[in-house]
Amino acid sequence: MSRHELSTEHADLRAAVEEFARTEVAPVIGDFYERGAFPYEIVAKMGRMGLFGLPFPEEHGGMGGDYFALCLALEELARVDSSVAITLEAGVSLGAMPIYRFGTDEQRKAHLPRLTSGEALGAFGLTEPGGGSDAGATRTTARLEGGEWVINGTKSFITNSGTDITSLVTVTAVTGRREDGRPEISSILVPKGTPGFSVGQKYSKVGWNASDTNELVFEDCRVPEANLVGERGRGYAQFLRILDEGRIAIAALSVGLAQGCVDESVRYAHERHAFGHPIGHYQAIQFKIAEMESRVHGARLAYYDAASRMLAGEPFKKEAAIAKLLASNAAMDNARDATQVFGGYGFMNDYPVGRFYRDAKILEVGEGTSEVQKMLIARELGLPA
Ligand SMILES: Cc1cc2nc3c(=O)[nH]c(=O)nc-3n(C[C@H](O)[C@H](O)[C@H](O)COP(=O)(O)OP(=O)(O)OC[C@H]3O[C@@H](n4cnc5c(N)ncnc54)[C@H](O)[C@@H]3O)c2cc1C
């Protein structure tokens, strides 16, 4: 599956999202970003385009597409802005996907139509104040009492969890002990508005400023026993699966940001003059941009490869980790180089490259840090855990 082999459906989708991002997102998103405001109208338009339903079957309100279609949409959005891209990524991959993959028929019927249409957003609460990489060390607990789960704990940095249209969060919690003494972790669905579930601090962030990230607090929060997502004790395995897929999506988002850096740099290299020539006349600038383009190309092939393995039903854990590692590196390196091409203007908020610079860092952290990706790759090569 290389770029020139995109199917007509994939190519049409990519073109439609590219146009939407250029004409509807790019002109206004800087203002939302500076105000730290969530762009409800843009998200509603993305919903009407069907972007939140891309990888889901029509019976659940989806578009009947596949995960690669989602990745293409994320790449085109992030080429212009990462806040809207991560809102889509988290809404689909972390919000709706756990319910689609592991939920009961009742849970799917109750929640998926609003999530896949973009009318509502779901969130996934895994990370805690005590740590994200070591996700097995979850401290949040859920005990069964009178047919209800009673949840206590705090989740950190949860995307899409505090907007006006957030409808639920799926949280991981320790629901008991295994025979070997290790914690039994399960996933439980908590609708917004459930007593005992509150949205804590809204973070002040370095980047992704037009996206929603909050701390979540659960204090004797009671939900019906039927809100268990999938089998009891399978929560750890479930989120590993969700994160494997999510890494391909974050790789696509990273490629989009890295491509946006190339787009902007090429344009500016023609426009900006120094010493009697456009700066693009100088090899120092040309080589920088050539390296940026090479990084994007390699990272894109890596995520296409991981996605095609996933869609073919083949193992893709290592390839997803490689794609995420390469693409987030490319995004960071390209953001640094693009701001350099822009000189002082690169440090100003008037140009998108400053925003790209602030948005790039989290890509080396979210949905598994670069160190975690290397651990996964090493394990897949048979090195000890
Ligand atoms: C804006 C934003 C949005 C987010 N959205 C969500 C969300 O929607 N849902 C959610 O659950 N989480 C979310 N996260 C959390 C994110 O996934 C975590 O921040 C990430 O997994 C890292 O966890 P941590 O921050 O606790 O870092 P830690 O796990 O404390 O790691 C700190 C450092 O130690 C390194 N490290 C840890 N263990 C090892 C090891 N064994 N070997 C080598 N190095 C190691 C890490 O790589 C890192 O460099 C979000 C985070 C941010 C900032």
Image (cartoon, helix red, strand yellow):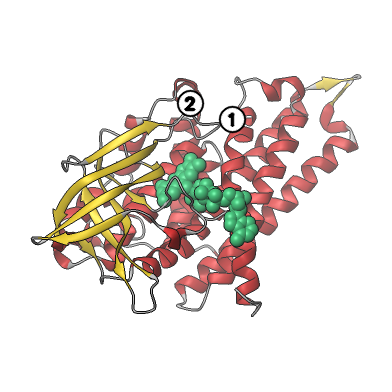
Q: Nearer the viewer, residue 206 or 90?
A: 206
Q: Amino acid at mark 1?
A: Arg
User: Which label number is shown at residue 148?
Assistant: none
Res. 157 image quadrant: top left
Residue at screen point 90% across, 38% down: 283
Q: Residues within 10 Å of mark 2 (few under 14, many from 20)?
A: many
Q: Is residue 252 left or right of residue 46?
A: right
Q: Amino acid at mark 2?
A: Tyr
Q: CA distance from mark 2 to mark 1?
A: 8 Å
Residue at screen point 86% across, 20% down: 274
Res. 49 image quadrant: top left
Q: Label 2, secondary structure: give it.
A: helix
Q: From the image, which quarter does the N terminus lie in?
A: bottom right
User: Which label number is shown at residue 355?
Assistant: 1
Q: Nearer the viewer, residue 221 or 360?
A: 221
- Considering every residue shown, the one lying at the far left of the view is 146
Residue 112 in the image: above or below residue 317: above
Give coordinates of residue 279: x percent, y percent. 83, 28
Q: Which residue is mark 2?
A: 33
Q: From the image, which quarter does the C terminus lie in?
A: bottom right
Q: Are marks 2 and 1 in contact (CB under 8 Å)?
A: yes
